[in-house]
Image: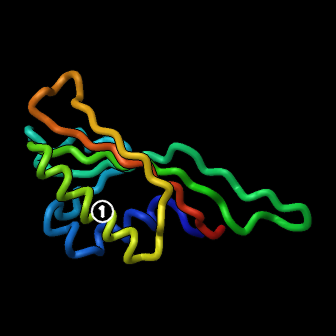
Amino acid sequence: MADESTIRGVLVAYAGLTALVSSRVYDELAPTNLPTPVTRPYVTMTTISDVPENMLAAAPGVAGMRIQFDIYADSKASAKAVLTQLRAALHAAGHVGCEELTQSLPADSPDIRRISSDWLFMLSR
């Protein structure tokens, strides 16, 4: 069964991305037990939805999983470089996401840049 850990595995196995973030691809939030300040750049993954495909005669074999990736970095250029490698990693693994891209600054940390990228994956169950 494919799930968000499958997608994380794709990301941490891609050399272009790990050159930038090492293994700092986290589920939802960066862990709180890391040394302060947290080493940037890093990526968080949040599952937004996980909806099985409609089937009439059998259990669904595919689900649409929407995952939001948030890239945190010290500069806009660094965040964009990570986004480029994240896209390359997913495309190399055969995932072509419906992607919406937004950019914002976290309100509590104006020195951190964040880029959010939203992807829809069709994963087998």
Q: Nearer the viewer, residue 69 or 37?
A: 69
Few, some or many C-alpha atoms within 10 Å of disc 1 (few <14, some 14-19, many ≥20)?
many
Residue positioned 17% across, 64% down in the render:
22
Q: Residue at x 66, y 67 (%)?
A: 125
Quadrant of the drawing holding the N terminus: bottom right
Q: Which residue: 23% across, 40% down?
A: 114
Outermost residue to the top? 107
Q: Can you say whether 4 is above or below 77 in the image?
A: below
Lateral position of residue 90 relative to residue 13, left or right: right
Residue 69 x/y as whole percent: 36, 49
The residue that label 1 is drawn on is 86
At 59% from the left edge and 64% from the top edge, which residue is drawn?
Answer: 122
Q: Position of residue 2 (x, y in %)?
A: 55, 67
Percent from the top left, x then y, of residue 82? 21, 58
Q: Secondary structure at mark 1?
A: helix
Q: Amino acid at mark 1?
A: Leu
